[in-house]
Image (cartoon, grey):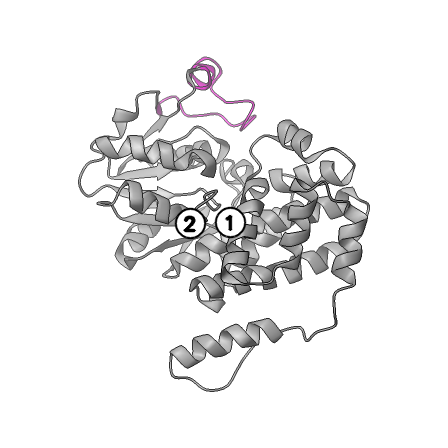
Amino acid sequence: MAEISILGSGAFGLALAVMCRNMGHDVTVWSKFPEEIQEIRETGELSGKLPGVKIPSDILLTTDISSIAGKEVVIIGIPTSFLRGVVKEANAYLTEGTILVNTAKGLEAGTYKRMSEVIHEECPNHPVVVLTGPSHAEELSRGIPTTVTVASEEVKYAEYIQDLFTCGMLRLYVNTDVIGCEIGGAMKNIIALAAGISDGSGFGDNTKAALMTRGIHEITCLGLACGAEMDTFSGLSGLGDLIVTCTSMHSRNRRAGILIGQGVSPEEAIKQIGTVEGYYCCEAAYGLAKKLNVPMPINEELHHLLFENGDVRESLRKLMGRPNRHECEHYMTLNQIERLKHGLNGTNC
């Protein structure tokens, strides 16, 4: 049994709290919102974020962030926009040797940094493990079989979390490609938002399949430019997470996209749905792609729709009217570079 603290009372943080307590771990959940803590204490659930899921009464609930002191593992379940501020505050109370497990998926606005980079900057003396993959909180909390990836710069920490969390309904796979896992987890939200817009606009399965397939192409190209490994994007943190987020109504990104496709303004859609990471990540990814000179036409058109008052039909016309090209040509260019770095010959897209 381990002593675990979870920073954040969002749906995924609570789902992990339920899972960890059911495994016998000692669990504390911290929230900056006293009203959420009070609701859980009074009703046994948090209806606005994880309706119908009972939170075990022996999970300690607190608004005191110093409660993380002495814990073996601290899970960070904070939206990307607020993550830096929370981990900066938390650093003062962390105990030597505490492993930080990040579940947030996105890029920091302005800096374009991945969440593990932000955590390393604010908590430089602690190992960071990234937990990511196709894992809706609504299903994880109800014991529906789920598989995810855990990645760390030092594999022993990922393996420790793998052993700690693996149970009958949750299986974890270790991956050493932290960059790829985080890029995949962040960027799939953007494609899911686009897929939702397609659904809301009345386009068909063909259209969404095209967005998903070309979307994983864009994700992979950006990831390779950042230093990721290509194989990662065909795994759980890439293709797996993309599939579940683009096709499920549990996905806030898809639901927000559907509203936008139906004519609701992006601002109103975000207001109705709540935290929509793809909305914020789109702008960061747009800047990062420009910085690295990586063409990302889907992300560019989504940026136009979200932040420049663009028109869905016009964006579709532009995407469908792009110059003819070979399917894997950009993969080949980037893969050639990577293979040359490793002294290999030939290409394989």
Instruction: Kindly indicate the quadrant of the structure image that contains residue 149.
Output: bottom left
288 vs 16: above or below: below
Quarter of the image where the C terminus is located: bottom right
The crowding category of the residue bearing disc 2, from other C-alpha atoms within 10 Å (few below 14, some 14 to 19, many at least 20), is many
Mark 1 or 2, which is nearer the eye? 2
How packed mark 1 is, by other alpha carbons closer than 10 Å (few <14, some 14-19, many 20 or more), is many
Locate residue 207, reporting x and y percent.
Answer: 76, 56
Q: What's the mark number on residue 186?
A: 1
Mark 1 vs 2: CB contact within 8 A = yes
Pick the residue in front: 330 or 273. Answer: 330
Where disc 1 sits, the SS reads helix
> Is 39 one of the magenta-colored residues?
yes
Query: At 48% across and 51% down in the image, what residue appears?
Result: 147
Kind of residue sitting beneath label 2: Arg
Mark number, residue 117: none
Q: Nearer the viewer, residue 298 or 243?
A: 298
Disc 2 target residue: 114
Residue in the foreground of this view, choosing between 204 and 107: 107
